[in-house]
Image (tube, coloured by chain):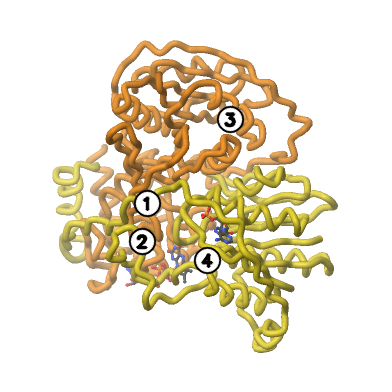
Chain colours: A yellow, B orange
Amino acid sequence: MKTAICIKRVPDTEARIRVAGDGTSVDESGLKFVVSPYDEFAVEAALRLKDATGEGETVSISLGGSGAGEQLRATLAMGVDRAIRLDGEGSMDGLAVARALAAELKELGPDLVLCGMKAADDDQQQVGPMLAELLGMPCVTVVSSIEKEGDTLVCHREVEGGTEVVEVDLPAVVTVTKGEHEPRYPSLKGIMAAKKKPLEEKPAEGAESRVKVRRYSEPPPRPEGKVVGEGAEAVPELVRLLREEAKVL
Amino acid sequence: MAKVLAVVEQRDGTLKRVSEEVVSAARKVADGIGGEVDALIIGAAGIGDAAKSLGTFGADRVIAVEAEALSSYNPEGYAEALAERAKAEDYFAVLFAATASGRDLAPRVAAKLDVPMASEATELEVEDGELLITRPVYTGKLFAEVTLEGSPRVVTLRQNVFRPEENPRQATVETVSADVDPTAWKVRVREVRAGSGETLDVAEAPVVVSGGRGLRGPENWGLLEDLAGALGSRCALGASRAVVDAGWRPHGEQVGQTGKTVSPQLYFAVAISGAIQHLAGMRTASTIVAINKDADAPIFKVADYGIVGDAFEVVPRLTEEIRKLKG
Ligand SMILES: Cc1cc2nc3c(=O)[nH]c(=O)nc-3n(C[C@H](O)[C@H](O)[C@H](O)COP(=O)(O)OP(=O)(O)OC[C@H]3O[C@@H](n4cnc5c(N)ncnc54)[C@H](O)[C@@H]3O)c2cc1C
Ligand SMILES: Nc1ncnc2c1ncn2[C@@H]1O[C@H](COP(=O)(O)O)[C@@H](O)[C@H]1O
């Protein structure tokens, strides 16, 4: 089985994000970048599937500038076999991103495409299902565990108030959420091996973003909160405030 | 005439409450462009009648796609039926709720229509005939104001943000049949495992009681269950990642960056420190209450009301006071 994992380079989730001077982009100076957390879960899922069947190839793909090579290397260090960087810039237009990825995936011909459930920067939850439409594949989203049974995958999908057990025919696109398994840390051996693994670079099929950002803004600061008091004695006053001031009880 | 399509949802034949939010938002957009609102519902025969009440919130017409095979959610069948309806008229915008199925469906429909989309909007405004969409990015650290070049404009709306508003119309109900072939579907739902019983999902509940590592173990969750019980049936339980990673609570309850994003009217953070990844999931709540024994815990910086104290003393008292109030 050939598994492709789509990964995105995003700012570290701890980072403070600032609006750039132009008001329509983000100031990237001084930011530390990581593999988007859900994409790490997707890598882990791909590696586990490979471990379970003992065969197959894993390929990570990213659309991004040269910096994204760093994140692709990180996936190689985790154990992915090879990587492809589509040289170009991602945008908030999920369909444009999906189109660029789909062009490459059509050539690659994977049995399974894994995406993160959402990217930690634009928070869209679009690319996976859009890719599936463009590739003519079925798609299961927000999956916390995957098992292979012949030519189908059995996925646990998180929905409101429970879990759906869903069966999907391969080839398919699956978007991954946090499951039982923590993404593995690359071992020293893995990091050394990653340096020798192939990382191909190709121009991306470019499309202009049809999502136009007018401006970025910081959320209005929450009004200064108040500490009502200390210990259980403060409870009646809290309840009064919730009822009379906030009007939520 | 340009119209707005509000995609509404049902579960087991009953209209989901979030439908009122979507129709109310669609009404505002339609008023902005001088258009009408169509509410679209998909389900088994008779589902159209369940949606007729949406006239109250401003729907001019209810379109019911009725087919036995579509009685419960299926991604392929629903996306197909929806794309067909969305193409049938000149829609200015197609609005979905950002629920599990709305998030699953909207990008497929956008791809089928070859239009861009915007996810998790928290504000919509029509200005000079264009739809301005505000949506949180970087897990709520920033807001982006965007427009979409393409028609219809496909948008999902964050739950609990757009308030239902009455704006009564006599909605007509039109039933259409769908040409669906379930044998061609490649995704099959084998089974639905309900989570923690009857309780509402944390992502859709207007009141959330979340617990953190400070509660010391799963055996102490009765404390939060009692508080949630006192707050009523529209209250759900949430948890920090520390709690979920320790296996005390299921991942479905996790709030934050790698869990669910919630925007309830009232959020209780009990013994949760307030790490940035937790805040990412709940900072858009209308009212936040923090209970923490550490006066310097970062959660107090975002909380509207806080009590510095031991959860094991504060929470039972809170439950008791709320019971008194509601009793
Ligand atoms: C990539 C990434 C993603 C993450 N995603 C998430 C996410 O989705 N959601 C999430 O929550 N976290 C997430 N985290 C983890 C996050 O950084 C914190 O580690 C986590 O939120 C801490 O959980 P906590 O507040 O329950 O525990 P702690 O930080 O250990 O806090 C416990 C709190 O309880 C208080 N306390 C102790 N005893 C009592 C008592 N008796 N009464 C009252 N208060 C008491 C303490 O003062 C303390 O403030 C993520 C981290 C990373 C790196
Ligand atoms: N530029 C990109 N390169 C590779 N994969 C991406 C890119 N952008 C998004 N993805 C994939 O699509 C998922 C969802 O992204 P989004 O729809 O932007 O939230 C991510 O978790 C990645 O798996």
Compared to B303, does B199 lie above or below? above
Which of B16 and B310 lies nearest the eye of the viewer?
B16
Callout 3 amino acid: Ala
Q: Residues within 10 Å of mark 3 (few under 14, many from 20)?
A: some
Mark 2 highlights which residue?
A: A25
Compared to B169, does A176 lie above or below? below
Circles 4 and 2, Cβ within 8 Å, touching? The answer is no
Callout 2 amino acid: Ser
Q: Quadrant of residue A200?
A: bottom right
Pointer 2 or 1: first along the chain = 2
Are the residues under badges 2 and 1 in a single subunit?
Answer: yes
Mark 3 highlights which residue?
A: B83
Residue B199 appears in the rendering: no
Mark 1 highlights which residue?
A: A213
Chain name for mark 1: A
Are the residues under badges 4 and 2 in a single subunit?
Answer: yes
Callout 4 amino acid: Ser
Measured as percent of width and height from the top left, residue B293 is found at 27, 70
Mark 4 highlights which residue?
A: A36
